């Protein structure tokens, strides 16, 4: 029983190590990423600036790592995020409030709950604490076991979905020829076909990735007298519409209810109209198909 | 009374801050704005009607003042005001050494008490003459750091003001001078708490709440307004063996790291002594480690606790086992009205998850659940208790799930409002979509908000939405023009048959609350909090913040 569990843990840790190898190694001293700009309604501008611990003496770190590996690893995991027996140490209030082992020592030397006491002196525990404190702890935790691919879909089914949903505007041999070569990252491609250009303001924390060639939103204003005016939409609210004309000059029109008539031409509207109609399977199938457009 | 008091102050030739009688907080909202929502009900419905549908078109700017946060903000009269006024004193406190900077964004409720406005931003508080906007004093707190995401306002008890800081202190200030009386640690900075909530004064209790984006437990605490000593602490998640709700977690360690933070003030029912508030999301927010198996009580819930004892009277969990960081913190609104033809005392709440709820205020009994954002697509079923049960396929998944709302939510914390004149509940809403990808496949999950990537796909529209609490149906909604999709700001309703709200384009707008018809607007370029109203010298004012400035409007 014990052996079986132990073997399973070793397997799990080995597998984890293999997967981590695919991700860039994290720097324990990297400060936590700031709250992304579009961090929901908690408002922009979150700092996330929790002071990190100063860099440790490499010799101490090395000793602490070795001691941790012998005494703690088994239950708390090689990354201190918990195992089958012991809890995640990184978010433990005892560890977060510890400076150099002074809070950890009584638990290690006296035991606590299911944790047995360990024959370690204060210096050794201080070294272990230094090692545990070298891990980065933050609310915007970096993903370390990032899946290598998001592709799960069926390209054939995706081709059928393409014909049904996309082919009225796009062609696999025309405007989208070579799409899978131009955008080799399947996730960027998937986000991109759903909403080219990232969907504009307020959509969350997207916005990165290749620049899709999205034409600008235009607007047509029909004043009560005089000719229609057309241009690129600069701004619109209930009271004003501003457009920029071909020569770059801007014109603003006062809005009073339905007057003057204002028509917005959003080139992404067909993509918006499709959003409520997709199943996730269709999305994944479409992506599987689109990556094949070389 | 006010009309008598005002000339007295003029004769005396000084502007002295007057104490606030805690009993005044139990009165319906009218002449002043002495607490976060104006009164305890959270309705943000003012009985004032001097400004009304017939004259709102004549609303005029009375004054505007710009504020500068930080130590560099010393001295009054910046931003074009202050000709002749003596420089306002700056009082500096703090346990830290850092000046978080002069980026001033007023998201807070502003208190108005006896002719003085009290406002705040993270690490800063000001007192301002409500008659012309000139600064009386500025208090600035040097910080240890932490998440400086916002501050929701001050609380007042007698002559004292209370401010929470991002590095987790409650500061008590003398309202007359801005001088610090004491500060107390209210949460543990090492555990990455940050404190943004506007404290709420009820009788001789000052209630505080916390924020945390790691996995630390949420709690509400009551403190003595004179000394700051703790009276009681209520955790929103189980903290030890035997605590109720523990069976809704995979393990005690999971529960104790289950979050449920309380970062927006609740409402108060003086009849039952219940403080009624919403709790935040469970943590880790986006991943499903075994330690989080279950419904995760009392996260994403409306909770009523007896303010005298700190014990829970009832709870209703809106959103069991949330997986999208959709806090249920928007201030619940307490109303008396009819439901199914019978008089009822109720709680109304529009949730970040896209659903509106009506509950019985005395028992927590569920009365109604309805969808107020058309795009919402993550719910598998509304169960017999009226709870929104998630479709696990709409969690963050490796190949990506298309989900509405986005993380920002169908709505969020900006204050909703209710008008007894129309029987309608008003809320800013947004029909936004995002792709949610799981990026951490370690079965133990990530910590905090990690482990996923959310990529926004834009919005089908953002709205000012009016909901009939009796049916849950949308009575009307006003779509903001354009192709963007930002969430609008908080809302004020008045007995003048007016609804004031900032739109998503920097306008302060007055609407007819019966149908959403626009009656007046002014473009300020930005609106950053919910409008408020009060009376001074017999004139009603409308107050709004625009980032670093306040604007006061009135009729002359």
Image (cartoon, coloured by chain):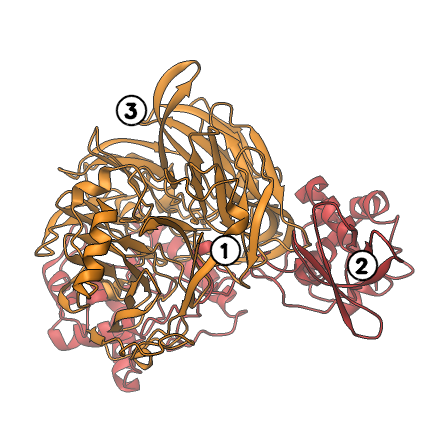
Instruction: Give whichever of discs 1 and 3 has the lower sequence position.
Output: 3
The N terminus of chain B: image quadrant: top left
**Hue used for the chain lettered B:** orange
Tell us which disc is closer to us: 1 or 3.
Answer: 3
Tell us which disc is closer to us: 3 or 2.
Answer: 3
Residue under numbered circle 3: B363
Marks 1 and 2, Cα distance to the nearest angstrom?
26 Å
Q: Residues within 10 Å of mark 3 (few under 14, many from 20)?
A: some
The C terminus of chain B: image quadrant: bottom left
Q: Quadrant of residue B457?
A: bottom right
Q: Is residue B230 left or right of residue A95?
A: left
Residue under numbered circle 2: A292
Residue B401 x, y percent position in the rendering: 61, 47
Per the image, label 1 sits on a secondary structure element best described as loop
Q: Quadrant of residue B124?
A: bottom left
Residue A73 x, y percent position in the rendering: 30, 64
Tag 2 subunit:
A
Residue nearest the observer in this picture, B138 or B76: B76
């Amino acid at each position: 029983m014990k052996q079986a569990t132990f073997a399973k843990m070793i397997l799990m840790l080995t597998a984890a190590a293999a997967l981590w190898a695919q991700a860039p190694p994290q720097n324990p001293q990297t400060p936590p990423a700031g709250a992304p700009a579009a961090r929901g309604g908690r408002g922009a501008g979150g700092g996330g600036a929790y002071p990190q611990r100063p860099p440790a003496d490499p010799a101490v770190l090395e000793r602490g790592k070795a001691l941790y590996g012998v005494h703690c690893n088994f239950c708390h995991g090689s990354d201190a995020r918990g195992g089958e027996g012991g809890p995640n140490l990184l978010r433990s209030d005892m560890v977060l409030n510890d400076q150099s082992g002074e809070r950890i020592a009584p638990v290690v030397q006296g035991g606590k709950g299911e944790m047995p006491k360990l024959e370690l002196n204060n210096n050794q525990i201080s070294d272990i604490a230094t090692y545990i404190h070298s891990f980065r702890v933050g609310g915007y935790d970096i993903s370390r076991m990032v899946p290598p691919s998001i592709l799960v879909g069926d390209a054939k089914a995706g081709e059928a979905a393409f014909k049904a949903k996309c082919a009225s505007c796009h062609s696999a041999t025309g405007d989208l020829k070579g799409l899978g070569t131009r955008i080799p990252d399947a996730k960027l491609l998937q986000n991109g076909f759903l909403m080219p250009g990232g969907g504009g303001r307020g959509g969350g924390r997207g916005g990165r990735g290749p620049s899709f060639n999205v034409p600008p939103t235009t607007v047509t204003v029909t004043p009560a007298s005089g000719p229609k005016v057309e241009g690129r939409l600069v701004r619109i609210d209930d009271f004003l519409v501003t457009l920029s004309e071909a020569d770059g000059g801007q014109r603003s029109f006062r809005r009073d209810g339905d007057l003057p008539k204002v028509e917005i031409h959003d080139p992404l509207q067909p993509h918006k109209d499709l959003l409520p109609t997709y199943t996730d399977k269709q999305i994944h199938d479409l992506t599987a198909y689109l990556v094949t457009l070389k | 009374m006010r009309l008598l008091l005002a000339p007295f102050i003029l004769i005396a030739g000084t502007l002295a801050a007057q104490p606030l009688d805690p009993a005044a907080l139990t009165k319906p909202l009218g002449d002043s704005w002495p607490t976060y929502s104006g009164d305890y009900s959270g309705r943000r419905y003012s009985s004032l009607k001097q400004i009304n549908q017939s004259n709102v078109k004549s609303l005029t700017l009375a004054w505007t003042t710009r504020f500068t946060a930080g130590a560099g903000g010393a001295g009054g009269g910046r931003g074009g005001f202050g000709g002749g006024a003596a420089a306002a004193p700056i009082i500096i406190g703090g346990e830290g050494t850092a000046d978080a900077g002069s980026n001033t964004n007023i998201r807070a409720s502003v208190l108005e008490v006896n002719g003085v406005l009290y406002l705040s931003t993270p690490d800063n508080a000001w007192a301002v003459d409500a008659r012309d906007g000139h600064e009386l004093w500025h208090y600035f707190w040097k910080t240890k750091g932490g998440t400086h995401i916002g501050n929701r306002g001050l609380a007042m008890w007698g002559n004292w003001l209370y401010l929470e800081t991002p590095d987790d202190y409650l500061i008590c200030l003398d309202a007359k001078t801005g001088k610090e009386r004491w500060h107390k640690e209210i949460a543990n900075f090492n555990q990455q708490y940050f404190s943004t909530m506007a404290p709420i004064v009820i009788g001789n209790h000052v209630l505080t709440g916390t924020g945390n984006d790691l996995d630390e437990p949420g709690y509400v605490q009551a403190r003595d307004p004179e000394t700051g000593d703790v009276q009681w602490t209520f955790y929103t998640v189980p903290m030890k063996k035997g605590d109720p709700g523990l069976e809704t977690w995979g393990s005690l360690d999971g529960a104790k790291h289950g979050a449920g933070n309380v970062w927006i003030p609740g409402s108060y029912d003086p009849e039952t002594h219940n403080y009624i508030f919403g709790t935040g999301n469970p943590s880790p927010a986006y991943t499903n480690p075994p330690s989080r198996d279950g419904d995760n009580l009392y996260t994403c819930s409306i909770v009523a606790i007896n303010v005298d004892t700190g014990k829970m009277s009832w709870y209703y969990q809106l959103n069991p086992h949330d997986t999208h960081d959709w806090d249920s913190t928007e201030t619940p609104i307490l109303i008396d009205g009819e439901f199914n033809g019978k008089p009822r005392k109720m709680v109304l709440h529009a949730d970040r998850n896209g659903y509106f709820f009506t509950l019985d205020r005395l028992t927590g009994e569920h009365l109604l659940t309805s969808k107020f954002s058309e795009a919402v697509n993550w719910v598998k079923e509304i169960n017999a208790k009226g709870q929104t049960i998630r479709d696990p396929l709409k969690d963050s998944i490796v190949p990506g799930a298309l989900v509405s709302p986005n993380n920002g939510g169908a709505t969020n914390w900006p204050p909703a409002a209710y008008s007894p004149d129309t029987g309608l509940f008003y809320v800013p809403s947004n029909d936004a979509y995002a792709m949610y990808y799981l990026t951490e496949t370690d079965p133990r999950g990530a910590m905090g908000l990690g482990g996923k990537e959310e990529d926004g796909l834009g919005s089908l529209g953002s709205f000012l939405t009016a909901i009939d609490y009796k049916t849950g149906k949308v009575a009307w909604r006003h779509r903001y023009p354009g192709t963007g999709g930002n969430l609008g700001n908080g809302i004020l309703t008045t007995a003048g048959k007016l609804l004031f709200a900032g739109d998503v384009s920097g306008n302060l707008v007055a609407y007819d609350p019966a149908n959403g018809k626009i009656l007046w607007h002014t473009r300020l370029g930005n609106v950053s909090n919910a409008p408020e109203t009060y009376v001074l010298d017999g004139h009603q004012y409308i107050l709004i913040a625009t980032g670093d400035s306040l604007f006061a409007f009135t009729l002359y």
